[in-house]
């Protein structure tokens, strides 16, 4: 048994993300030397039977069916929000006011205005905070960040990203309620822009700096779907597909695309960045490989190389197995918890904080606004 100082976690929501987070809290200290030991103290959800099954499976010590109880409990240090997007703000603000640290699923909020209020409250409370944009912590993506920061790419000309899926093509798929709230604009805020492009935007802002302005188009291919909660056929208000152009502050040009109607693609999250001296490309379907082209290589040997990011000197990998052995999607969440705990210990908060995630929200807002107006839209600067 470790004699580290413990931090008790209260998780709200037990779906897909509830599982990725529980797995991360359980495993983190087996692999990372963190200053704190997270304890799976309480899990919260509205359906008592499902909640109990989840809590038993993952080892949560207790359960609550009202999220306000998690906030009230004096034995909870970290509130972890895994609920649909429309409840992030209320829960995060209540948790911050109660002095809890807050970890919040992405996207931060329904829109920038709500995100601003969350940032205000969390910073006023002075509590540790983080948003779960997990793909930054895939080792190959973190390596890309290190290569870019080393200056090897030189001046950046282009950035392109996409996130393609195909799970909503069936017009009989209902919207709203458990599992399908991502199709309901009231619960999700937007469609692929807030759900999938937000990941691409977070990664892009981290790798390539701020975005000045955007020009976007969106489409809703299936206009009406039955709503699971009302039983009525209702208008679909989310964007099923979105493509946008952007100009970064560093002068580079970008294209971003996302859809849930790309037959054959399940989670094709990619980016490519082209600099004057070198280029980098990455693809979630082959997440351990980083493609790298360096113009400074000797002419004869110049070409794209495929780096298998599993060596101990690659980001995070020294904490896992032996060179050549892979890790996967779930490990990006373990890395996120490890960095969050290190950040609390060192007083140097791990990113993305709520404030960092607000910048992504501003870009999403600008994208949706441009799609409505057909005009280029400036992205507000973080104050
Ligand atoms: C949607 O299908 C989804 O589960 C997103 O909500 C996640 O954020 C993304 O990582 C995978 O796809």
Image: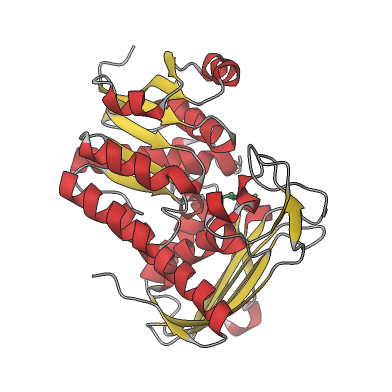
At 80% from the left and 57% from the top, the residue drawn is 169
At 64% from the left and 65% from the top, the residue drawn is 239
Instruction: Indicate the colouring scheme.
Output: secondary structure
Q: Nearer the viewer, residue 265 or 357?
A: 357
Q: Is residue 82 left or right of residue 257?
A: left
Q: Nearer the viewer, residue 84 or 304?
A: 84
Whether residue 312 is situated above or below residue 38 in the rendered picture: below
At 48% from the left and 40% from the top, the residue drawn is 333
- The image shows residue 223 at horizontal and vertical percentages of 75, 63
- The image shows residue 336 at horizontal and vertical percentages of 41, 43
Q: Quarter holding the C terminus?
A: bottom left
The quarter of the displayed image where residue 205 is located:
bottom left
The quarter of the displayed image where residue 271 is located:
bottom right
Whether residue 341 is situated above or below residue 351 in the rendered picture: above
At 25% from the left and 40% from the top, the residue drawn is 96
- The image shows residue 364 at horizontal and vertical percentages of 48, 68
The quarter of the displayed image where residue 64 is located:
top left
């Amino acid at each position: 048994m470790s004699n580290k100082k413990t931090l008790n976690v209260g998780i709200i929501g037990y779906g897909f993300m509830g599982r990725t987070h529980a797995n991360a809290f359980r495993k983190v200290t087996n692999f990372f030397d963190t200053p704190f030991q997270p304890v799976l103290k309480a899990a919260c959800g509205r359906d008592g039977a499902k909640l109990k099954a989840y809590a038993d499976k993952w080892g949560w010590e207790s359960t609550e069916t009202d999220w306000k109880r998690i906030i009230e409990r004096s034995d909870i240090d970290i509130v972890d929000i895994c609920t649909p997007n429309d409840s992030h703000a209320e829960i995060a603000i209540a948790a911050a006011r109660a002095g809890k640290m807050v970890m919040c699923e992405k996207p931060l909020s329904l829109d920038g205005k709500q995100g601003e209020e969350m940032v205000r409250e969390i910073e006023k409370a002075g509590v540790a905070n983080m948003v779960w944009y997990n793909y930054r912590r895939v080792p190959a993506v973190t390596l890309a960040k290190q290569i870019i920061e080393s200056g090897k790419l030189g001046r950046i000309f282009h950035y392109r990203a996409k996130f393609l899926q195909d799970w909503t093509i069936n017009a009989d798929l209902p919207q709203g309620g458990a599992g399908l709230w991502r199709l309901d604009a009231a619960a999700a805020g937007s469609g692929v822009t807030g759900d999938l492009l937000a990941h691409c935007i977070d990664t892009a802002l981290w790798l390539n700096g701020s975005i000045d302005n955007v020009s976007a188009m969106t489409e809703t291919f299936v206009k009406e779907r039955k709503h699971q909660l009302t039983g009525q056929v209702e208008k679909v208000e989310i964007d099923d597909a979105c493509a946008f152009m952007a100009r970064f502050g560093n002068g580079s040009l970008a294209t971003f695309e996302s859809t849930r109607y790309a037959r054959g693609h399940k989670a094709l999250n990619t980016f490519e960045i082209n600099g004057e001296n070198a280029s980098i490309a990455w693809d979630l379907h082959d997440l351990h490989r980083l493609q790298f082209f360096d113009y400074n290589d000797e002419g004869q040997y110049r070409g794209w190389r495929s780096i298998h990011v599993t060596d101990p000197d690659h980001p995070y990998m020294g904490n896992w197995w032996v060179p050549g052995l892979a890790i996967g999607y779930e490990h990006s969440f373990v890395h996120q918890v490890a960095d969050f705990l290190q950040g609390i210990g060192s007083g140097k908060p791990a990113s993305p904080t709520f404030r960092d995630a607000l910048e992504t929200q501003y870009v999403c807002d600008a994208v949706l606004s441009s799609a409505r107006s057909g005009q280029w839209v400036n992205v507000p600067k973080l104050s």
